[in-house]
Amino acid sequence: MDFINHFIVPGIIGGIFLFGVARGVNTFDAFLEGAREGLSTAVSITPALICLLTAVAMFKASGALDVLSWGLSPLAQAVGLPGEVIPLALLRPISGSGAMVLFNDLLAVYGPDSFIGRVASVMEGSTETTFYTIAVYYGATHVTRTRHTLPSALSADLAGILMSGVAVRLFLGAI
Amino acid sequence: MMSYIISGMILLAILTGGIGGNMAAVSTAAMNGCGQAVQLVISLTGTICLWSGVMRVADRSGLTDAMSRMFRPITRFLFRELSEESPAMKAISMNMAANLLGLGNAATPLGLAAMKELEKENRRAPAASQAMVTFVVLNTASLQLLPTTNAYLRLAAGSKEPMEILPAVWLASSVSIGVGVLMTRLLAGWRKS
C-alpha cells in the first residue's frame, strides 16, 4: 500500500513530462508558463486564507468548541452518534489539521476498532475542510456572491456526519 | 454567506473566551493565526506552481483532452451549462482525477485552475455561476477512493483492520456528495442575484 503510494506522485509527474517530450512539446517552456500562473493564484488566495485562519485560530483558542460540543451532544445521541465525536464533526469543516489531531486523540483514547473509533474514522474519511475549500476556491476568482454554495456544502457535510453513524452500524455493528 | 461564518466564529471566540477567562489565548491566537496563514501560502505556492506547470505540460501534449473525455459521462451530467470543449472541463476533470487518487496536494491547484477557467465563462459575475457552485461543493465533499492517511493513522493506533471502514466511508461519502449535488440544484433558483 505504502509502496504504491510513494510511486504515484513521481510516476504522474514523470509520466506527463515523458509523454510531453515524446509528443514533441517544449515541456520546460510549458511548465514555466503554468507555474507563472500558479504564482499569481497563490497571491490571490492569500487574503482569504489570512481572514479564515485568523478566525479559526481565535475560535479554537477560545474553548468555544467545547461549549458547542457540550450543547450539541444530546442532539447527537438522539441521531445515533456518540457525543465523543461531536468536537470532530464541528471542527472538520473548519480546520483540517485541527480535525486530524482530534481524530488521532479519539483513536488513542477509545481505540480504532471501538464504535467511537470507527465512527470517527468514517467521519474523518467522508468529509472535507469545507470552509477552507470555499474560501480558497473563491479567493482565486473575483466572485463576491457565492450564492447557494455554503448551504449546499453544509447540507452535504451534515449528511456525511449523520451517515457515518448509520454506515458503521450497518457494516460493522453497533459496538 | 462566508461573512456570517467568519464573523460568527470571531464573535463566539470573544464570548466564550471572555466568559471562560481565555482571552489571553484568543489574543495570541489572532496574532499567530494570520502569520500561520502566510506560512501556509508559502508552502502552498510550491505545490500550486508545480501542479499548474505539470498541468500545462499535460495540456500541450493532449493528455488533459483524453482525461476530460474519460470524465465526460460524469461531467456532462454535473456541469450541463458548460460546453464539452470548454477549457474549464479539462481542469475540472484533472481535479477530479487528483481527488479520486487522494492527491490532495494536486487537487487544490488543479481546482484553482478550474475556478479561473470557470470565471472566464461566468455570465453572472460578480456572483458565482451554477457550474462554480457545483464544482466547489464537490470539492468540499470527499471524493477519495482510498482514504490512505486515515487508514495509516488507524494502523498506527493499533487497529487490527485499518481498512475495514472502507464500505462505510464509501456509503457516507456517496450520500454526502449526492445530498450536496441535489442541494445545488434545488437551491439554484433561490437567491437569484
Image (spheres, helix red, strand yellow):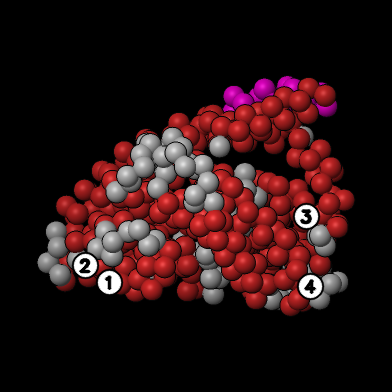
Q: Which residue is mark 4?
A: A169
User: Alpha carbon of mark 1 to alpha carbon of mark 2: how far?
Assistant: 7 Å
Give the label, 2 or 4, closer to the camera.
Answer: 4
Residue B52 in sight from this viewpoint = yes
Query: Which callout, 4 or 3, points at the residue further toward the start of the chain?
Result: 3
Instruction: Inspect the magenta stretch and tell me whether residue B43 lies in it.
Output: no
Whether callout 4 and callout 1 share a subunit is answered no
Q: Secondary structure at mark 2?
A: loop
Tell me the quadrant of the picture where the N terminus of chain B can be found.
top right
**What's the chain of the residue with tag 1?**
B
Whether callout 3 and callout 2 share a subunit is answered no
Q: Residue at x 60, y 33 (%)?
A: B4
x and y percentages locating residue A114 in the rendered image = 81, 68
User: Alpha carbon of mark 3 to alpha carbon of mark 2: how far?
Assistant: 46 Å
Amino acid on which disc 4 is placed: Arg
Tell me the quadrant of the picture where the C terminus of chain B can be found.
top left
Give the label, 4 or 3, closer to the camera.
Answer: 4
Q: Which residue is mark 2?
A: B62
Q: Foreground residue, A108 or B138?
A: B138
Instruction: Inspect the magenta stretch and tell me whether residue B32 lies in it.
Output: yes
User: Alpha carbon of mark 2 to alpha carbon of mark 4: how far?
Assistant: 46 Å
User: Alpha carbon of mark 1 to alpha carbon of mark 3: how far?
Assistant: 42 Å
Amino acid on which disc 1 is placed: Ala
In the rendered image of this protein, does residue B14 appear above or below residue B144? above
Stretch of the chain drawn in magenta: B20-33
